[in-house]
Amino acid sequence: MKRKQFVKGITQIAQEGAIQIFREPLLGMEEIIVGVVGVLQFDVFEYRMKNEYGVDMVKEGLGYSHIRWIDKAPCEPKDLKISSDTKVVSDMRDRPLLLFTSEWNIRWALERNEGLELSEFSRGDLQ
């Protein structure tokens, strides 16, 4: 029962544009990554989930501060040569992207994956 409320809540709040939802391939909605601009935005999300949808959450801070959508890749995203602290995820529209901890990791990925093209915004969001 709470799973349905959880999915409904995060989907609704994400559609409002208040948060971004990311997930790792093959993990489904049990574990998600919520992208926010700041801590206050996450606090509002957490409050709304509890008070509007009756869902308690367990949160764990992650060290990612840079996000890049994959516009073009020389291979499947899971097979890219990336640093150990870079994560391959997809957004709610199943578009692949990378989460990075630093600008250095972005350069490292681009240097080691010839033909890799990344953007700060999804092309689908710009249309």
Image: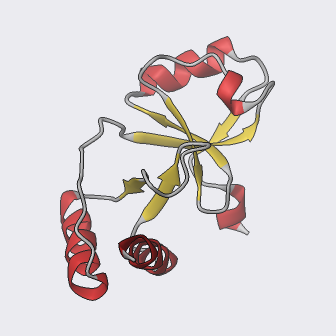
> Which of 52/2 is in front?
2
* 70 to 85, vertically: above or below: below
Which residue occupies the extreme front position in the image?
A: 1
> Which of 55/18 is in front?
55
Specify whether 69 is left or right of 51.
Answer: right
Which residue occupies the extreme bottom position in the image?
A: 52
* 69 to 38, vertically: above or below: above
Q: Give percent across and percent down for residue 36.
A: 34, 59
* 2 to 96, vertically: above or below: below
> Which of 54/94 is in front?
54
Instruction: Name the residue rendered at 44%, 55% in the picture.
Output: 30
> What is the quadrant of residue 122 in the picture?
bottom right
Quick one: quadrant of the C terminus? bottom right
Instruction: Name the residue rendered at 45%, 17% in the picture.
Output: 84
Q: Give percent across and percent down for residue 103.
A: 43, 27
Mark count = 0
Instruction: Name the residue rendered at 24%, 43% in the picture.
Output: 61
Q: Give percent across and percent down for residue 42.
A: 25, 64
Instruction: Name the residue rendered at 51%, 78% in the picture.
Output: 15
